[in-house]
Image: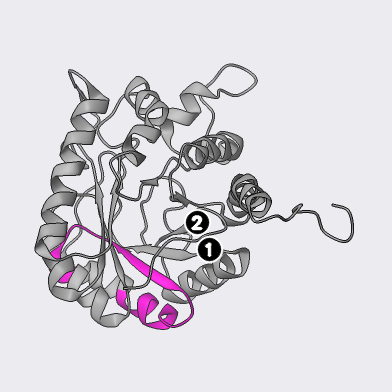
Amino acid sequence: MPSPLNEDRPLVMGVLNVTPDSFSDGGEWFQSERAIMRAQEMVAEGADIVDVGGESTRPGADPVPADEELRRVIPVIEALAGQVRVSIDTTKPAVAEAAVEAGATLINDVSAALWAVAARCGAGWVAMHRQGTAKSMQRDPHYNDVVAEVTAMLVDRAGQAAAAGVEEVWIDPGIGFGKTVEHNLELLGSVSGLVATGYPVLVGTSRKGFLGHVARSADGSVAPVTERLPASLATATWAMQQGAQMVRVHDVSATVQAALLVGRPATAAASRSNGSSGRSEAGE
């Protein structure tokens, strides 16, 4: 399998919620035609992967039957396959299998339980940490050592996936999934430790609730979703600087700019080691 990584910059995964109830943009891309148009916009903005999800994983969300989830995502995946790499955001084996058959090549798995499906289908797999379910995860998150516990769980699942034959395995600390604000900040501060495990790391902070609590509005109130772009960019940039090889975001264009800037120092260092000044003829 070719390397999924980009030598010039971290990868940017664009979020495409084909749902009526996702926390940030629920309903905005619920119709297949609108979802496909939005995906094409993200591709034009530089998205490396479009992550298609048909079931909201926001705190308190109700589960969606598999047949309804399939109805939402399969037409979109079929339309996008061949235009951009597509991942399927699901916890259901049947949906994952059908999505891969429709053209998805990565299973973004909130449950961290579908490695056997990925192995059987020949797809890549993202193991994400979540404490509890969507219904229960934010009721009372508790850890003795959130960084150690999340890391151990992810390394264990990633190892099982690799042993089962999955060639492309990612780990994701699951920011906002069964964590308090402090848990999320601790995990963000420890991204480099996840990177040190040797597995490529995906981090998703985009527009999440903890950002609204930390980066409050001018009047001191919790910043609403529409005012979380600066905090989203700051945390994505931090994660990339710490070695995360991919970030999952709603705001693709702005994040691609940040990823290019993060990747530039490494590119410049490589140029110097090869005897190049790294300067353009225009003197930039």
State which quadrant residue 271 falls in. Answer: bottom right
Measure how far apart labels 1 and 2 are at the Cα level. Answer: 5 Å
Mark 1 — residue?
47
Q: Is residue 208 above or below residue 93?
A: above
Where residue 219 appears, x then y in whole percent? 63, 17
Where residue 211 appears, x then y in whole percent? 48, 30
Q: Looking at the image, which residue is at 43% across and 44% down?
A: 244
Magenta part of the protein: which range?
74-95
Q: Nearer the viewer, residue 146 or 63?
A: 146
Q: Nearer the viewer, residue 11 or 222?
A: 11
Q: How many residues crowd around disc 2 within 10 Å: few (fewer than 14), some, or many (20 or more)?
A: many
Q: Looking at the image, which residue is at 32% across and 37% down?
A: 194
Q: Per the image, is 184 magenta?
A: no
Mark 2 — residue?
12
Is 198 positioned to the left or the right of 50 in the image?
left
- What's the mark number on residue 206? none
Q: Looking at the image, which residue is at 36% across and 47% down?
A: 201
Disc nearer the start of the sequence (1/2): 2
Is 235 positioned to the left or the right of 95 in the image?
right
Q: Nearer the viewer, residue 263 or 119?
A: 263
